[in-house]
Image (cartoon, rainbow, N blue to C red):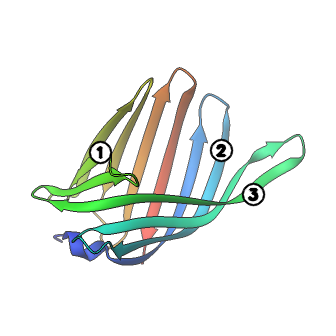
Amino acid sequence: MTRHFIDFEGRWLISRRIEDAKAGSSGSFDGVASFSPDGEGGFCYEEVGELRLPAGPNGPTAMQATRRYLWKADPDGVRVLFEDGRDFHRINLAQDTATGFHHCPPDDYEVSYNFSRWPNWRATWQVRGPRKDYMMITDYRR
C-alpha cells in the first residue's frame, strides 16, 4: 500500500520499549502521537505519555514525557526537523522500509522505519556513543 505524507495526519497510539545495553535495563513509554497541520504545509509531531524507567533506590520511576518534531513533505517523502527547525533526518515513504541517520557528536542515532503493515508502523532507533548504547522500538497504530 502506498503511503502519502498526508496519511500521517491525526492521532496515533504509541507503545515504546527502551532497551539499554549499557545499563542492562529496560523501560517503556505508552501514549499518543499527534500529527497536526503547522500552517505551512507540514505537521507538528507531538507525543505525550507516561515514561517508565527501571527501579532506582526509591522504586520504579514513572513520569509524564513529551517530544516534539516538525515533519515537512519533500520529494522523497518526509524531512524530520527538530522543534527549533534544525535538520534531524529524512524518511522515504516510497518503500516499505526506510532508514535515517543523525550524528550528534559524540553520539550516532540510526533509525529504521517499517511500514509493511500500514497503517500500523514501527520506528526502531539504535543510539550509540561513549556513554550511550540503547534501542527504542516504537509501534504506531490508529
Callout 3 amino acid: Ala
Distance Cα–Cα, label 2 vs label 3: 13 Å
Determine crowd level at label 1: few under 14, some 14-19, many 20+ residues with C-alpha closer than 10 A: few
Q: Secondary structure at mark 2?
A: strand
The x, y position of residue 135, in whole percent, is 50, 41
| Circle on res. 40 | none
Residue topped by disc 3: 62
- Dot 1: element: strand
Residue at image mark 2? 26
- Amino acid type shown at disc 1: Asp
For the residues marked 1 and 2, what is the alpha-carbon distance in whole angstroms?
A: 29 Å
Amino acid at pointer 2: Ser
Most extreme residue toward the left is: 75
Q: Quadrant of the C terminus?
A: bottom left
Closer to us: mark 3 or mark 1?
1
Task: Confirm whether residue 115 shows in the render.
Answer: no
Q: Position of residue 117 (x, y in %)?
A: 31, 67
Q: Earlier in the sequence, mark 3 or mark 1?
A: 3
User: Residue 44 location in percent, x, y?
Assistant: 37, 67
Hey, which residue is sitting farthest right in the picture?
58
Q: Specify whether 5 is left or right of 28.
A: left
Residue name at image x 44 percent, y 38 percent: 126
Residue 102 in sight here: yes
Q: Is residue 114 left or right of residue 135?
A: left
| Residue marked by disc 1 | 87
Displayed quadrant of residue 77? bottom left
Looking at the image, tell me whether mark 1 or mark 2 is earlier in sequence order.
2
Q: Are marks 1 and 2 in contact (CB under 8 Å)?
A: no
Q: Quadrant of the N terminus?
A: bottom left
